[in-house]
Amino acid sequence: MKKFLLLIRNHQNSFRTIIAGFFLMILLGALLLCLPAASKEGSVSFTDALFTSASASCVTGLVVFNTATQWTMFGRIVILLLIQIGGLGVVTALILTMILTGRKIGIMERITMQDAVSAHQTGGIIRFTIFFLCGTLLIESIGTVLLMFEFVPQFGWIKGFGYALFHSISAFCNAGFDILGIDAPFVSLTGYADHTWMNIVICLLIIIGGIGFLSWRDFIDHKFRFRQYRLQTKVILFTTAVLLVVPFLYFFFIEFDTYGMKERILMSLFQSVTPRTAGFNTFDYGKMSESGLLITIVLMIIGGAPGSTAGGMKLTTAFIIGVSTLSSLGKKKEVNAFHRRIENEAIANAMTLATVYVLLLLCGTFFLSGYEKLPVISCMFECASALGTVGLTTGITPTLHTASKLILTAFMFFGRVGGLTLAYAMISITRKDLSRYPAEKLTVG
C-alpha cells in the first residue's frame, strides 16, 4: 500500500510540475512581449501580451494582433520559441536541458516525462524522449526545405527561409500562427487556397505532429504492418482517417460546391485537417455556413492524439465514447476494439473528459454571447477554438473585451494542459476505501 501511495504521489507531483511549467512559460512570454522591443508600436497591454503568450505556448493560434505587422523580429522569435517549447512540452525542454548538461535524471523526472508524453511506462522514457526530439528536428527541417519552394520565389532567399522556418514549426506544432498578413491583416493562408504544394506540405506537417509521438515509434518499429501496432496507435490512425474523410465529403459536396474542382478539393482537404488543431485556414470562416461551423466545432473539440503537439479532448476519447455507445446499444457487457478489451477506467475517463469539455464550451459560449452581444454560433466557435487549442476564428477575437480574453486564455491553458492533468494535480492522496454501498437500480432513458 505504501508503494502504491508513493507512486500516486509521484504522478500527482508530476502533473503539478507540468501545470507549473506551462504557467511560468506563459507568464515569462507575456513579460517579454510587453517589452517595447517586442512590438513595432511600442509596448502592448499585459492582458494582450498574456493572451498572445498563452496562445503561442498552448499552440493555439488565436491572436488579438496581426502577427506580421504588430511584432518586431524579437517579438516573432519569442512567439516562435513559445510555440516550439509549447508543442514539445515544457517538461520535454527541461529533460533536454538536463541531458545536454549531463545532469542525472531521477525517477521523479522520468515519471513526469511519462505523464507529459502519455507514455505507458517509464522504462526507456529517456531514449524515447531523444527519439522524438530528433524526429521533431528532422521533420521541421524537411518542412522548412519544402516550404522554401513556395516562399523563396515569392520573398527571396533570406526572407523566404525565415517564412518557411516559421510556418514549418507552427504547422508541425499545430499552432496556426502565421506572418503573412503584411498587405491585409489576419489572412492566414487564404492567399494559397489553390496552391497544391503549400496545402499538401502544411497538411502533412499538421497530421504528423497531431498523431502523437508513440504512433511514430510504432511506425518506425513495424512499418506498415498495422496488426502489430499497439491499440492506441490503431485507434489514433483509424479515428484520424474517419475525421479526415467525413468532413472532406461534407465540405466538398456542400460547403465549397461553387468553387472550381482543384480549389474545391484543396479547400475541402485543408478545412478537414486544420481543425485538428492547427488553426491555419485557406477560407474565411466568417463566411462559412452555420452547419459548416458546427462540424468544425466538433473537430476542434476532439483535437489530436494524446502525447502529440495537438490539443482538444483527444482522438482516443472520441473513439472510446463511440465504441462504448455502440456496445451499450448492442447490450454488450464489455467494450472491445481491434480484438482488445478497453478498460473501464479508460471509459470513465473518456466520459468525464467529454462532459467537462462540453460544460466548459456551453458556459464559455453563454458568457461570451451575453457579455459581448455576439451571435451564439460565433462565440461557440471561438470557445471551441480555445479549448481545442486550434486558433481558428470567425474574426471576433480582436474585438473582445478583457474579461472575454481572460476566459479564452484560461480555456487555452486548460486545453493544452488537459482536464485530467488538472484534476489529478488537485486531488488529495487518500487510502483506497474498501467498503461499498448497496446497489440499487436506476432507470436511464
Image (cartoon, grey):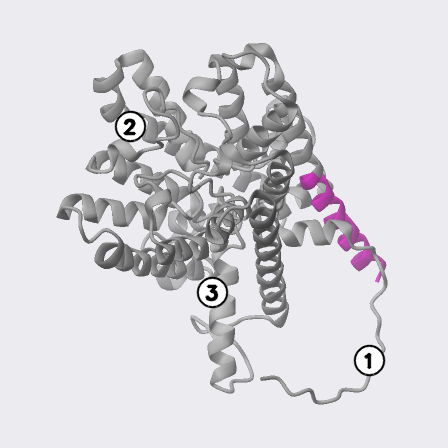
- Specify the label residue 147 is tagged with: 2
Nearest the eye: 442 or 216: 442
For image coordinates 40% across by 50% down, the residue present is 221
Nearest the eye: 291 or 170: 291
Mark 1 lies on residue: 436
Mark 3 residue element = helix
Mark 2 / mark 3, whichever is N-terminal: 2
Q: Main secondary structure of the magenta part?
A: helix
Q: Amino acid at mark 1?
A: Arg
Q: CA distance from mark 3 to mark 1?
A: 31 Å
Mark 3 lies on residue: 319
Bounds of the magenta span? Answer: 1-19
Mark 1 residue element = loop
Does residue 38 sit above or below 411 in this rendering?
Answer: above
Mark 1 / mark 2, whichever is N-terminal: 2
Callout 1 touching callout 2 (CB < 8 Å) = no
